[in-house]
Image (cartoon, rainbow, N blue to C red):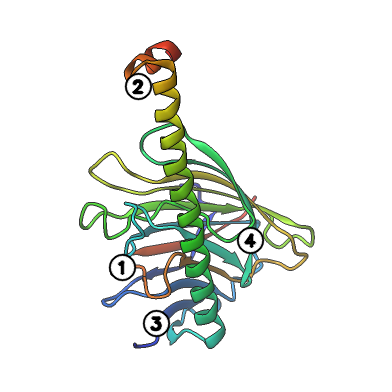
Amino acid sequence: MTTPIAIEVNCATGEVIERPLTAAEITQREADATAAAARKAEEDAKAASDAVAKDALLTKLGITADEAKLLLS
Amino acid sequence: MANTYTLIASVTVGSGGVASIGFTSIPATYTDLQLFASLRADGTFGNAWYDSYVTFNSANLSWRDIIGLGSGTPSSRNDTTNFVTLGVPSSGATASTFGNVALYVPNYTSSSNKSASMDGVSENNATAAGMGLHAGLYSSSSAVSSITITPYNSPTVKFAQYSTAYLYGIKNS
């Protein structure tokens, strides 16, 4: 895999530099991606669990989702 | 635009994209800074928008956010991590669309902690679109001399060609 490129403008000189990411920057990006995947998995799991709980509640109440919306409107 | 605005520098991303966009050696001769960016990411993370983040002097800020996703009720979020703006369309959004991010940094040379405000709205010809209002805190006595914006979710995703960023300095007189 080619090393990703960062673009930087030196505001003092106007020079535009395109340089490969440093090892630290690559490590940070990999850590970000791991954290993002964990966060998404957590959010997806919560959404799935909420959907199951919602269906169970509607069944318990004996009403449809549309009827529940009507009640809350 | 008020004549106290001065364009300090700008960037247009070329073919192949870039992993981050940065402004370095920002002069300390203005009162405030304003960054306007029009961005698109070349990857997706299951959403029509792509999470991206901003650093000052290579350090993260602490953010408080209100975010909307194109449907449902907007929600609040505290970002102790560096996961901030949703104003960047992903490759899953309508082709060739770019989002808008505006970042304002008052008193960026202050020796006290600095505040920042940011809004970002992605673009998509569909219901799903990320948007957010963000209040940031940069806890440092150093002047802000560099600003970088980076895609968050993947080590390989880049800002796409034709993304732009413009940094302005603003004087109060």
3 and 4 marks in contact (CB < 8 Å) = no
How would you rate the neighbour count of disc 3 (Cα within 10 Å): few for under 14, some for 14-19, many for 20 or more? many
Q: Are marks 2 and 4 on the same chain?
A: no
**Chain letter for the residue marked with disc 3 in the picture:** A
Residue B96: x and y in percent read 22, 58
Task: Tell me the mark number nearer the camera, choosing from 2 and 1.
Answer: 2
Element class at badge 2: helix
Q: Do labels 3 and 4 share a chain?
A: no
Mark 4: amino acid: Tyr
Residue at x 38%, y 75% (from the top left corner): B156
Element class at badge 1: loop
Is A41 placed left or right of B95 in the picture? right
Task: Tell me the mark number nearer the camera, choosing from 4 and 1.
Answer: 1
Query: Which residue is denoted by mark 2 in the rendering?
Result: A65
Mark with earlier residue (4, 1): 4
Mark 1: amino acid: Ala
Query: Which residue is denoted by mark 4 in the rendering?
Result: B30
4 and 1 marks in contact (CB < 8 Å) = no
Element class at badge 4: loop
Mark with earlier residue (3, 2): 3
Q: Do labels 3 and 2 share a chain?
A: yes
Q: Determine which of the numbered discs, if any, sits on residue B160 in the image.
A: 1
> Gap between marks 2 and 4, in whole Å?
56 Å
Query: Which residue is denoted by mark 3 in the rendering?
Result: A4
